[in-house]
Each structure stands twice: as C-alpha cells, then as structure tokens.
Amino acid sequence: MGSSRLRGRQATFILKAMSQGSKVALWKISLMSAIFLLGASCQKKSAAPDLNKKLVIATYSSLGSDHGFLGWAKQEFEKATPQCQLELRVSPGATQLIAEIERDSKKPTAEIHLAIGLDDLLYARSQKLFHSEFSTEAWNGVAASLKFKKEILKDLSPGFLPFDYGALTLIYSKNAVEKLNLKLPTRLSDLIRAEYGKKFIVQDPRVSSPGLVFFRALGDEVKLNELSPQWRLLAQSWDTSYQMFLAGEAPMVWSYLSSMAYHESKGEGAKYGWVQLADGLPLQREGMAVMKSVPLNPNELPRCLESFLRFVYSDAAQAKIYEKQFMFSVIEGVTVPAVFEKIEKVRNLRALEVKLNETDAFLKTFAQKVQLEQSSEK
Amino acid sequence: MQIIQIILEWLFEWLLNPPVVSLVVHTLIKIFVTLAGSSLIAFILFFGLRQLRHHNQFLPLLSIFWVMPSFIIVAAVIIFLRSVGAENNLYDWPAVYLGWGMGTVPVLVWYLLKGYADLDLRKIKAAQTLGASPWQVYSRIIFPQVSSFYLYGLAQSFYILLTSFSLVVILGGGSPRDTLETRIYQEWALNTQTGISNGSNELWVLVFWQCLVLVAVQMGLVWVSRKWNVSSRLGSVKLGEWIPQPQENEQTHSNSVGSFFKQKVISFTLLAFILFILIWFNLFRPVITSMVVASASATITLLLILWLGSLRQRNWRILTFAGSWVSPIVVSWLLWEVAFRFEWYDGSVFKVIAVQSFLFAPWVARSLFPLLDRRRKGEWGAAISMGASKWNAWRVVEWPRLRGTVFSLFGLLVAMSFSEVSSVIFFAEPGFEPLSLWIQNQYTQFRLDEAYGGTALLFLGIVLVVKWSHSHES
C-alpha cells in the first residue's frame, strides 16, 4: 500500500512536471505555428506576366473551349509564335466575363491583358477597364492594311476591336409554319398579334446576349405587358431556346442568322428559314479590348500582343471564325465556306445604338415590369 | 420619437415595396387557389375511397408521396399536357397548378383517410342505432374529427407549396413566373453571375417575407396540432409498407421456387435497368455524389439527435426544430452568404451536408425524442450494475427498441436528400453536381430524354433505399 502511494505521488509529480514542460512546449509550438501561418497568409504578390513572353486572354466558354475559336487559335498561334504563350481565362458567359475582368483589375497586379468576346454593349459598360484610345503607330500600320466590312465600322466605339459579327433574326421551321398556316412577321413588333401567341421562343435579356439584342432592337415599339403573354418561353440561354425549337416546342426562335449555316451543314437547310426583318437584322459585333493595365508604348506594341492581333486578323483565322464560331468574318475577301454562301450576302444589317443607362434601367426593372404587368392582366 | 418614426418609415418603404408585396400576394393567391382545388378533389376522392371496404390499404400507397421526387410529377405533367394537346399550357402557370395539385391531392387524401382511421367507430354505430341519418352521422361525428386532420394536412401542404422549387422552375418556365422561393434564388443568381439585380427586389426583403409567411404557417400548424392533438394521433409515416412483400402461406409454399425466381428476375431486371441508365447517360458521378451527401446527412442527423436525446439538459432540443421554421432556400442562401464573407469557397459537400442535417433534424427529432424519453431505466440500471459499460448497455437495452425507427428514418432522410435541390443549388460547381441538380438542369435545358432517364433512376434509387430500410426495421 505504501509503495503504491509513493508511486502515485511520483506519478503525480511527474505528470505535473510533464504538464509544465508540455505547456511550455505547446506555447512554443503555438507561437511558431502562428508565425508560420501569418507568413503563409501574407499573399505573395504575383508578378504580372511578361507581355513579351505570355499573353493572358479573358473570354467566355464557347469561345475559349477546346472546340471554340480561341481553343484552335491558341494551338496555331503558339506553333507560329513559339516565343509567345497564350493563357485563356474562361468565364461561363459574356456577362460573367466582365465580372471576372473587374475582379482582376482590382488586384494589386492585374494579370489579364486582353478581353475577347465583348459585344458593343458590354464594352460600353466596362469601357473604363480598357484602353479606349488604342492607337499606336505600330497598330495603325497593321490596321491600315485590313479591309474591314463597311457595316462593321459604323458607329464603332474607340478601343473596341471587332473580330467577328453576327446578325440576329427569327429562325423558323418551314414544316411547323406551314402546318399552322402562319404568316411570317415582317417586324418584331408584329409578334404582339394574337396569331403569334406562344409561337416563338426568346431569351432572357438579363443573362443572354441574343435576348438582350432582341429587346434592344424592339425598343419602345412594344410594351412588355403586350409581349410577355406571347412568348412560349423566356429561355435562360440560347442553347436551351434552340433545343426547344428543334424539339418542336415553337415554330420560331430568336437566334443568329448563322444558325442557317448550321442547318445547311447538316443537310437540313431546306427545312428552316429566316425572317427578313423590314428594319434590318440587328447586328451584334464581337470584339477585343486591351486592358488598361497593359503598358502601351506609342511607338510599338508589346510583342505577343501585336503578334496575336495580327494573327486574329489574318485570312486563315478569319476564315476559321465561320467554322468555329458560326459567325461572320469582319474582313472582306476571306474564303467563305459553302454553307455560309447564301447568308454571307445579307447586308441589310442594323447597328443598334448603345444607350447604356436606358439598357441598364430596363434590365433592372425587367422582372418587376413583366411580373406586375402579367399580374394585372390576370 | 423622431428616430422611431424614421425607422418605421424606412421599414415600410423597404418592406412594402410594391413589386415585392405584389410577388408575396400573388404567391399566396396561387397557393390558396391550388389548395382550394386540391381540397375539393381530395374530398371527392376521400368519399369515394371510404365506400371501399379496404380503404386503409390506400394509406401505405399514398405515403409514397412523402418521398416521391417532384421530378416525377414534372414528367407526368409534361407527358399529360402533350398527350391531351394542351402544350401551350406548359412553361406557364396552368402547368404549375397541375403539378402542385398532383402533389397535394394525395397528401390531403392521406390525412383525410388517417383522420377517418382514427375515428371511434363505436360512436358511429351508437348514433346509427339511435336512428341518426347518414348526414347527421357525417356532420356531427365524422366531419369534426376528420376536419382536424384535414386542417393539419392543409397547413402541411401549404408549407410544401410555399417551399416548392424545382416544380415551379421547370413547369413555370423560369423567370418571370416566380414564387417567393424561386425569386430568392433568381435574385441571388443575377447578383452573383451578372451583377445585374432587380434593384427594387432586394434579396433580404424577399427572404424576410418568405420567413414571415413560413412562421405564420408553422404557427398555424402548431395551433391545429395542440388544439386537436393531431400530430400525436398521426403516428409515424411507415414508408416501406407499400413495397409488396412475399406472402408465406400454404398456397404459395408450393410455389416458393417459382416466387423465388420471380423475385430474382424482378430484382435483376431493375438492376439491369438502373445500370443501363447509369451507363447510357454517364450518371456515375452524380449518383455517387448524391449517395455520399445523402448517407452523410442522414447519419450525422441521426447521431446528433441520438446524442441530444441522451442529454439530461433538454433545453437544447428546441434548436433541432428550427429547420421546420425556415425555407430550405433561405438556409442554403444564408450559409452561402456566410461562406462568401469568410471566403470559404471550397467544401461544397460539407456545406450541403450541414444544410441538409439542419433541415432534416425536425423530422428525426419528432420520431426519436419520444422514444428516447421512454428509456428502460430498470434494464439500464441492471445492466450497469452488472458491470456492463455504457456502450454495451445501450447496445443491448436501448438499441433493439430504437433500431426499427432509426432504420426507417435513415431511409426517409436518404430519400429526401436524393430529391433535394434547394439545399444544393447554391453550392453547385463543376466537380459537384448531385443527381437531383443534374436532373433539374436537364429539364431546364430541355434535354427531356436525359431528364426522364435521370428521374426514373432517382425514383428507383429511392425505392431501393426505402425497401432496404424497411427490411431492416424489424
């Protein structure tokens, strides 16, 4: 009994001693860990990529995917210009692209050099992020040799470098229209007529750029409360709207004119048609813009930037636009694929005026207007 | 006073914003219209079924609707409207009404049948013996008792409709055909993805109104429950009873080999069908994701409630019921906001498990707490005094009587988790897409073949889980 008490006391003493020692050790470990964590948490400032070696491009998913134009361009450009590497930063959509660029511009060292895939409106909305006066001797020399299509240069914002364009209209299924004995509309404002009730699909302007073009083209001609009961669906993406159209959910869909080329390529060109809008097909230009954080020397452009811009405007790249993007080249005289030949000649195009404040106000109040007006109808 | 006045003015301007109030009012109107129509149909069905001798056999069948994913109703509505040539009603409110009705009528009929099953038949016989007419029997005896269950079911259905998400999104065709629940998500999506928000419909205002309406509904539910003691008379929902079990009797005994092969053929066919869908649509990743989330949520919820139930301090229990007082979309959004503020961008699985555990806790608590409180103290004390550890004592004394309920609840929670979209949608990212979200995306992107395939797989998965839990109940 006595020995066990002694052992107990010894054990207690050792434990106390150990606990004191372990307390000190624990304190030391904690202090070192805190220092380590503090050090680790301090973000290392990343150096901006060197524009003579690497070009960082922000774009959206269909353009930047492996099957998209930039996926092809990256491979070809890096082959042709081995000293320059391309890095693609891909966002889900064009509007998310702006959010990504804004985030990058707020970093201590911005990494993105070039944004590709902006349309007129998105460019106007985010113009403060880009070099708006993009004129250097080096670039002027390149640009002077390019033969842009006349419609493309009309009302172009400074600093906006168009690289492809699309025209939008109502694509229809000839079978469905014939079955319904439907007379095709000649203007977008015709869509409020009873005969077009639930006969077309359009995209949500807040999340889809074709949808936004639709409502911008419509302007004040038609009130939302007259139009909203007419659409079959306000699709959240062009992809969804076209899937529904192909599945026969509606005889007409708001889409790109180049959808006709897609159908031609599948041998279905005879089954579909497009509406020749009397006011002209709204034009959607897609372009590039150089970020303000890129240092621009008036005498010369950074090497990789200039090389890439020359590459995008080359005949080979512009010809690839048709295949990869199903859009039109901005340069005259480029080889046009056979499936595009019929629609390439369409030049009754209408450039939409960029009214940024009005458009933003429209988008912000879109849901409540439609909801309130729908409610009052019912 | 001036400060109070300013605050009140600001509150009224903020909360009584016309578009928001309009959305709230129209959501409530749509729900009331649906419930009115569903009630009418439910009563007609109830009277019809009541004439049948074995009307109680419909109860297990109707209990399927407690776990049936809304995608099945969506598919049924789409197929029905196309088949009757009413396609123009798709992606519009008529389709939503139809879907809501299809989900609500069986629930209301279930409550009516439950109420009828709870009747004291001796009272009816006594009244009939004393010469009461059928109308008098109905109006004086049957209706008062059944109506309490009906009101409870109505409040429950109101909650289901108010928090209905996938059905409204798919069948309504998306914005601007929104309810409060879907508009919360829509506003969040616009804010985060495009930076464009509907300036007058601030997210917080929508959340506030959703919570306010839900709390009012839940208080109604509590009032009905307390006034007529409905919830205790309901009993637990036995999910697996609608699964046909082989009958062991003399007639089938001679066919036992035949029935054995029949069972095996059915099982094999089902498994083959499931594999086919998995491979054809490449659904391995979504299915595995769903299984991980569902089993983790169910396990954590059950362990949490078992632990809380074992505590002497019972005040903590009230927290477990918090999940029934908020909408799933609000809980998910709140967690997303917290995670965003603290830059906790990773760990979608853990966030979803946390949300689902919070939402599922009330279901488990209602079933398990009464059981845990009826502890076999005598046997427990005897086991401990004979030297058994607490774990062994719990395993031998408590677990056998809890086992059936725990397995049943596990099956219920897994089935609910499989169908959950609201708790998942905020945390979706390329590497994390459970089956339910995958299916919703197929419907909204109009890939109907994939959507139907995924729906069939989801339902079969739920059936298998319920069957498994039902077989482990006894």
Image (cartoon, helix red, strand yellow):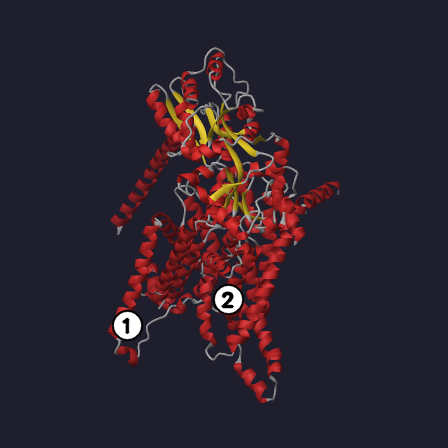
B141 sits left or right of B297 in the view:
right
Residue A79 occupies quadrant:
top left
Q: Amino acid at mark 1?
A: Ser
Dots 2 and 1 on the same chain: yes
Q: Chain of mark 1?
A: B
Residue identifier under label 1: B259
Q: CA distance from mark 2 to mark 1?
A: 32 Å
Disc 2 target residue: B106
- Where in the figure is residue A265, as x and y percent of width and height? 40, 39
Quadrant of the frame with the C terminus of chain B: bottom left
Tell me the SS state at disc 1.
Answer: helix
Q: Is residue B86 left or right of residue B291?
A: right
Residue B327 in sight from this viewpoint: no
Dot 2 or dot 1, earlier in sequence: 2
Give percent across and percent down for residue B465. Answer: 37, 60
Is A369 located above or below residue B419 in the figure?
above
Provide the secondary structure element on which disc 2 rests: helix
